[in-house]
Amino acid sequence: MEVVICSSPTEVAQRATAKVARICQEVGPNVVLGVATGSSPLALYEGLAARVADGSLDLSQASAFALDEYVGLPKGHPESYATVVNRTVTEPLGMDPARVNTPDGASSDIDGAAKAYEEAIVAAGGVDVQILGIGSNGHIGFNEPGSSLASRTRIKTLTPTTREDNARFFDSLDQVPTHCLTQGLGTIMAARNVVLVAQGEGKADAIAALVEGPVTAMCPGSVLQLHQHATIFVDEAAAAKLTLADYYRFTYDNKPAWQRDLSGL
Ligand code: GLP
């Protein structure tokens, strides 16, 4: 796991953009992205969109798989993740909507929709780079504390904390769905690269637990300690509770030039 501590949220987005763009270029036009919703990756998507706009990145033949979707929101609901991904990823990144996928949370067969999503990811050749944020309780995707570290796409019940965190997108807490379909931790771990972004003091406990705590279902993001190619981009506020922060800074500042070239960082 590589931890990159950035001086500001802007720098988090710049460095994460460079990393994702490098992977896209290495993989080629058919790159498969894993995309998170939430506010954390928005500036990263804007960074990628800027590269698409200036012609240095072409995602017109790329595919994407969203991490998760609410269960029970009607198709086209402005806060359904299908709509959010279309608005924040598909359109600005110039992607083909037919190649951008979200789990079908409106299905009458949720179990079948979960299985179909796993199969679609496999059929696309797997995810090349999974973009992640983190919930304040350590969730990734909607894998709430207690999630199996080997889980695959399935229905989950949202915790009160997550529903309260996400209530800002709805008129009231009551309107936030109680259930979701989410890629499992095992699904996320199968991605070939993981890029996680976190900003602000509200994420400091979750980041400390993810990077330096025990690998435990109580902090689902901690499973990333077992991933071979996970990069965690944090600003100073989100890094505030990392015991080895100075070591991560030293490591980054003293990266051998060849390694910096290879990783794009
Ligand atoms: C949401 C999403 C996650 C996201 C997280 C943090 O509920 N399911 O994928 O990473 O919560 O959201 P934000 O980035 O807005 O803090």
Image (tube, helix red, strand yellow):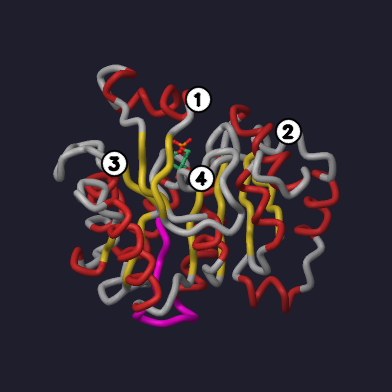
Front disc: 3 or 1: 3
Residue kind at label 2, given as amino acid type: Ala
> The C terminus appears in which quarter of the rendering?
bottom right
Q: Residues within 10 Å of mark 4 (few under 14, many from 20)?
A: many
Which dot marks residue 161? 1
Residues at marks 3 and 1, CA–CA distance in whole angstroms = 17 Å
Mark 4 or mark 1: name the one nearer the start of the chain.
Answer: 4
Q: Residue at x 32, y 46 (%)?
A: 69
Between 66 and 149, the one nearer to me in the picture: 149
The residue tagged with tag 1: helix, strand or loop? Answer: helix
Mark 4 or mark 3: name the one nearer the start of the chain.
Answer: 3
Q: Residue at x 52, y 68 (%)?
A: 191
Which dot marks residue 187? none
Mark 4 or mark 2: name the one nearer the start of the chain.
Answer: 4
Q: Is residue 1 above or below residue 216?
A: below
Mark 2 or mark 3: name the one nearer the start of the chain.
Answer: 3
Q: Is residue 262 above or below residue 110?
A: below
In the image, the segment drawn in magenta is 25-35
Residue kind at label 1, given as amino acid type: Thr
Q: Residues within 10 Å of mark 2 (few under 14, many from 20)?
A: some
The answer to whether 10 appears left or right of 247 in the picture is left
